[in-house]
Amino acid sequence: MCEKGLSSILIEAEAVLRAHPRHELPLLTRTAIYKELGSHAFRIDAKGKWAGAEPTLGLRRRYALAESCVRKCLPICIQICNKYLLDNYYMQLTLNDIHTMFKIGTDYLSGTISFKEVFDATNEFSAIVEDSPDTRDEFYVMLVGCASVNMVNIATNDERLEHDFQSDHDLEIYDWDTAYFCVSAYAGGTPWGMEYDPSKALEFWLWYLEEVKTVYEGITE
């Protein structure tokens, strides 16, 4: 059962989402949800330096939510890649590395790989996935690829819980959260683009709000 604070935020979030002409779930609403998922704490190493985030209950819930978002959009990548078979190296490489990101995030949280190993792997993948896509299909695959990198960054650094901006529209693409990358892929483009399908965005965000409950209730210790 969700706590009263989270339940209230989710009820309000759905009302805002349905009322929005483009069916967007605001950045500050998502941030409020992230905070309600649990605590956040930094690690400090023996030299007194910052060493990532502690794997608190809140972090593990936020990671699980991000992982669910990426898995929700993974069929989009698979469908696109299947159209091209092995003719598009960028797509095949990105799809393979998305699967690798799932393993890296899980391995880091289980303590089987180091912070440096994660850092090196995500940096290498970012250099590939952020290479300017030439087609709309490559753009969709790039969005999910970026989402998977963000997902792993939550494992090491946690979700961003404070913002200087009020709207996703004010952010650079590299500052988007995992969910925003995913909804842009799922809805066929960014909310300000011609290809964006508000009905698909609504479908994604309604699923997302239910997934918040699932993650909160499913991860309790």
Image (spheres, rainbow, N blue to C red):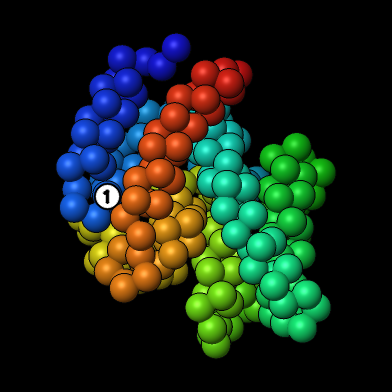
> In this view of the protein, which residue sits in the foreground, 95 or 195?
195
Q: Residue furthest top?
A: 1
Q: Amino acid at mark 1?
A: His
Q: What residue lies at 26% left-to-right and 22% top-to-bottom?
A: 8
Q: Quadrant of residue 174?
A: bottom left
> In this view of the protein, which residue sits in the foreground, 220 or 67?
67
Looking at the image, is 116 positioned above or below residue 212? below
Looking at the image, is 84 positioned above or below residue 200? below
Q: Quadrant of the N terminus?
A: top left
What secondary structure is found at the residue carrying circle 1?
loop
Q: Quadrant of the C terminus?
A: top right
> In this view of the protein, which residue sits in the foreground, 44 or 133?
133
Q: Position of residue 211 (x, y in %)?
A: 49, 32
Q: Position of residue 110 (x, y in %)?
A: 75, 37
Is residue 1 at least partly visible in the picture? yes
Q: What residue lies at 58% left-to-right and 37% top-to-bottom?
A: 64
> How many tags in the picture?
1
Is residue 40 at least partly visible in the picture? no
Q: What residue lies at 55% left-to-right and 87% top-to-bottom?
A: 134
Q: Residues within 10 Å of mark 1 (few under 14, many from 20)?
A: many
Instruction: Identify residue for label 1.
Output: 23
Q: What residue lies at 43% left-to-right and 55% top-to-bottom?
A: 183
Q: Position of residue 72 (x, y in %)?
A: 57, 47
Looking at the image, is 106 positioned above or below residue 1? below
